[in-house]
Amino acid sequence: MSDEPRPLLVDRTPFPDDGIDERLRAQLTFLVEIDRLKTILRQSPLVAAERRENDAEHSWHLAMMVGVLAEYADEPIDVGHTVQLVLLHDLVEIYAGDTPLYDTAAGVDQAEREAVAADELFGLLPKDQAQRLRELWDEFEERRTPEARFAKAMDRLQPLLLNWMASGGTWRTPGVTADDVRARKAVIGDASATLWKAGRRLIDEGERRGWSRSGSGGDGESVEQG
Amino acid sequence: MSDEPRPLLVDRTPFPDDGIDERLRAQLTFLVEIDRLKTILRQSPLVAAERRENDAEHSWHLAMMVGVLAEYADEPIDVGHTVQLVLLHDLVEIYAGDTPLYDTAAGVDQAEREAVAADELFGLLPKDQAQRLRELWDEFEERRTPEARFAKAMDRLQPLLLNWMASGGTWRTPGVTADDVRARKAVIGDASATLWKAGRRLIDEGERRGWSRSGSGGDGESVEQG
Ligand SMILES: [Ca+2]
């Protein structure tokens, strides 16, 4: 790690010195910087094109799912608040990188790296907003509220749908079994019995069709997000 | 136009016949279909990569902007509601295509094509949700509420920021002048005097640097979104 300040996107074309006050300048600096989320690739394949999804597309898709599927939450949720959580849940990956779901080695210091990344990225904002976004991100990570549990369920259900549409997608990753997939997806059931029943139906049917390997022999080390 | 039903993405890998009830099946069908938004390219260049932005990335970025910039709305707005508007405002382009801002020929039947597209796309959902999303989209289009005006302002301010970061971006399109850009962006001022002042500052400075052509000689026919 170097002590050099990280170059910001806005440094490439700095705003004029006058005519934009300090608070708004900080907010626009942050809003330009998060353009990077569009370049963070996930493992999941798109349905509509032959390429992997990026985190900005994924976050948008989760927000739409919250709006459409909120009625299945087992505990009452505030939809607008849940949408806020999914919109920002992956932002820290801009500086911390994406940690694939089954990559245990990379997961060791993930929490620490992501906390540092959150301080740095949210710290571009005025203090009050930096603190608010940090609280929202902590809420998502800790899953102590019904909104955070539902947001997490969407984060697991969305790539499950993409993998289903790809006749297996990352379920076919060597070393991953159907039991691994079921275990990773079970948090959907912490938010919605109905959605977890539907998700499990797709995983079971995928296993029956040979899209994932049967049994529990997975080593849990392989790269999978779906 | 043919009377053939349009093939849906979900038809490529239909859900199992059992285990997912009709209402949820309709919702998941819609949520798979809107994956197409990730393939609709805009004119605006990303800041963080050398490619054009797509509508899903754009919609996510607008939602983040609403969360960060809501304090500048001249009329009080409901942030959650405004976020809903920006998340879905471009969905009709999935079936209607994107109409560039200055392409007057294509604009003629745009409203009609988009209304048909809205009926078809939202019609995949259960009736109550189809109606709710249609109402939200109409609200955005008609700009009669403070939330719709602020959503529209974000829709104009975001590509302005991207163009600034690209040292002009689509402002450099032949036939477009700085006056054209100012005229197209003026709706930002219907929602926020502060944000329009900042936006105009960037347009003015871009003109001074020669990123856009001075004067009002634009023919208004060229392709520009920024
Ligand atoms: Ca993630």
Image: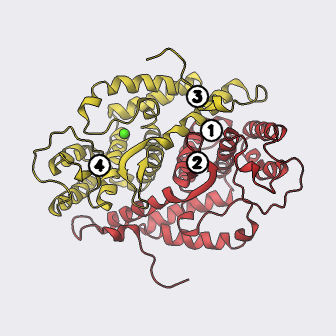
Chain colours: A yellow, B red
**Picture quarter containing residue A24?**
top right
3D distance between C-alphas at marks 2 and 4: 31 Å
* Distance between the alpha carbons at the discs numbered 3 and 2: 28 Å
Label 2 resides on the chain identified as: B
Ligand 1: does it lie within 8 Å of the C-beta at label 1? no
The chain ID associated with circle 4 is A
Q: Which mark is residue B70?
A: 1
Relative vertical location of residue A220 with respect to residue B43 in this rendering, above or below: above
Label whose residue precedes the other's in the sequence (4 or 3):
3
Respond whether the residues carrying marks 1 and 2 are from the same subunit.
yes
Q: Nearer the viewer, residue A90 or A151?
A: A90
Where does residue A114 sit, x and y in percent of width and height?
Answer: 39, 27
Residue identifier under label 3: A8
> Same subunit under labels 4 and 3?
yes
Camera-near label (1 vs 3) is 3
Q: What element carries label 1?
A: helix
Residues tagged 1 and 2 counted as in contact (Cβ below 8 A): yes
Q: Are marks 1 and 3 on the same chain?
A: no
Looking at the image, in which quadrant does ligand 1 appear? Answer: top left
Q: Do the residues labelled 4 and 1 touch (CB within 8 Å)?
A: no
Q: Position of residue A110 (x, y in %)?
A: 33, 27
Identified by mark 3, the residue type is: Leu
Q: Quadrant of residue A28?
A: top right
